[in-house]
């Protein structure tokens, strides 16, 4: 355990996979920030001054003996299957957004915060849902078979 505060500016792009992993767990609100402090499971303290937020699973610091990895805590959400018509999925997303609540989607499901307003809305719309615990990353939406690199799109002229 190191008593100095380590200043972090971004993820390690080529971490050493053979070293043991030490975890720093945070909630999604902290993970979305660029300026914050956190303490890893071994007590090592870090200050984060990031140009862009880290993502769960990022290695953000390494020493000769360990890799420090950030993980987002899972949280209560409701899962809505996307085994429906695209227009129905769009309508469900609009209705949840109209409550000013966040939403995420992948190829098979929508996730929304497990809040009474969401449950009441889905019940009223007769949309089946399953309460579950998951990593909730609002603003993430399925893009078919596209790569998951949101900013690395190439444009052909």
Image (tube, grey):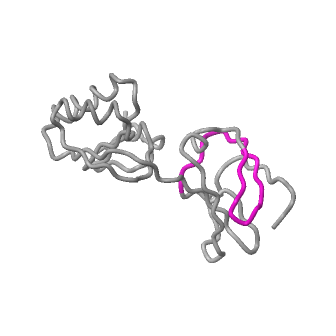
- Compared to 43, does 17 lie above or below? below
Residue at 72% from the left image edge and 55% from the top image edge? 39
**Residue lying furthest left in this view?**
85
Query: In the picture provided, is 78 more to the left or to the right than 19?
Result: left
Q: Is 49 within the magenta?
A: yes
Image quadrant where residue 61 sits: bottom right
Question: 156 or 89, which lies in front?
Answer: 89
Magenta residues, as a range? 37-56
Q: Is 45 within the magenta?
A: yes
Residue at 53% from the left image edge and 44% from the top image edge? 28
Q: Quadrant of the C terminus?
A: top left
- Compared to 113, does 22 lie above or below? below
**Residue lying furthest top in this view?**
98
Residue at 66% from the left image edge and 75% from the top image edge? 19
User: Where is residue 95 shown, x and y percent of the image?
Assistant: 27, 26
User: Where is residue 111 shown, x and y percent of the image?
Assistant: 34, 43
């Amino acid at each position: 355990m190191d008593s100095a505060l380590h200043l972090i500016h971004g993820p390690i792009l080529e971490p050493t996979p053979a070293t043991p992993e030490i975890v720093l767990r945070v909630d999604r609100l902290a993970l979305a920030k660029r300026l914050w402090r956190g303490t890893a499971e071994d007590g090592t303290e870090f200050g984060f001054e990031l140009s862009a937020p880290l993502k769960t699973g990022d290695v953000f610091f390494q020493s000769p003996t360990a890799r420090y990895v950030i993980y987002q805590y899972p949280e209560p959400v409701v899962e809505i299957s996307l085994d429906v018509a695209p227009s129905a999925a769009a309508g469900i997303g609009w209705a949840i957004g109209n409550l000013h609540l966040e939403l995420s989607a992948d190829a098979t499901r929508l996730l929304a915060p497990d809040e009474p307003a969401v449950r009441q809305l889905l019940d009223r719309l007769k949309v089946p849902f399953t309460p579950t615990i998951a990593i909730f990353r609002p603003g993430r939406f399925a893009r078919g078979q596209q790569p998951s690199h949101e900013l690395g799109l190439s444009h052909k002229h």
